[in-house]
Image (cartoon, rainbow, N blue to C red):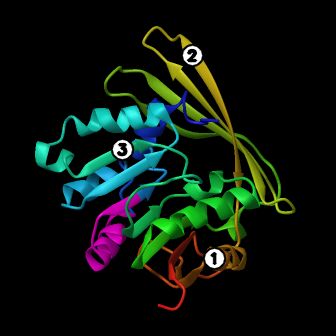
Amino acid sequence: MDSYRHMVRFYEMEHEAFVEDVALYRGFADRCGGPLLDLGCGTGRLLIPLAQLGFKVVGIDCSAPMLACARQKATSLTSEVASNIMLVQGDMRDICLAAQFPLIIIALDTFAHLLTRPDQQRALSAAARHLSAEGRLIIDLGNPMLLPALPEPLTLHRRWQDQSSGETILKFTSTHFDPGTQMEELILIYDVIDSSGRVIRSVHPFTLRHTYRREMELLLDQAGLDVEACYGSYDLDRYSAQSERMIFVACHSGL
């Protein structure tokens, strides 16, 4: 099910300014070369700046509305940059492209939307099939060691103004992480307040499955991939239990 089909607007407004990981992927793209494969590319948050840097990028996403937003954004680019982008609607578990890639990216917790072990294994096996012999797969996850063991009540997370409409938007979040199942039940609530004070509320529940470091290493091993490194930040700091991120760099076994 497309969890983002009704919240593309909010996702785009919240993430369009997030660029903390772009330098990391640019560094690996410079090292590995192109073309790049962005699995779960969404609205093109990462794909577009990489294309602007001159890299050919193929973006895969299962959400038609998210891809429609990415395509709309691509229309504002120069023809040269737009020619670097290919967008494909598809499921990362079942991709079948007639190409292999020296760099494959699963960015910003996208992997956590795979809720079962078979789904995770299928996605990693598909990525491994599309990874060139000397290529690298990068998976960016939040660190489950930092998740609270107790439910977090509904909390005002952010307030901002939509510059195009003048509407005020309030974002509320509620989350419950179960360490036993490694599942997080997350509820996002957006209140859109127009100039007359009218409020339109939308509610978006999500389920995420969090993966621990050694578990991820085993999953990659089962897909025929070795973990070259596990970093704890976009600055490539060494991972520790206190790190905010778990960034895995994997390659084909034996490299």
- Rendered residue at 56%/35% (across/down): 4
**3D distance between C-alphas at marks 3 and 1:** 36 Å
Percent across and percent down for residue 170 are 54, 31
Most common SS among magenta residues: helix
Left-right relation of 97 to 223: left
Res. 87 mark: 3
The answer to whether residue 173 shows anywhere in this view is yes
Q: Are marks 1 and 2 in contact (CB under 8 Å)?
A: no
Label 3 crowd (10 A; few <14 / some 14-19 / many >=20): some
Res. 200 mark: 2
- Rendered residue at 72%/53% (across/down): 115
Q: Secondary structure at mark 3?
A: strand
Q: Is tag 3's residue or tag 1's residue first in the polypeptide sequence?
A: 3
Q: Is tag 1's residue or tag 2's residue first in the polypeptide sequence?
A: 2
User: Where does the magenta region start and end?
Assistant: 21-37
Left-right relation of 29 to 65: left
Above-or-below relation of 171 to 26: above
Percent across and percent down for residue 63 are 51, 37
Q: Secondary structure at mark 1?
A: loop
The amino acid at mark 2 is: Ile
Q: Residue furthest bottom?
A: 254
Q: Magenta stretch containing residue 26, yes or no?
A: yes
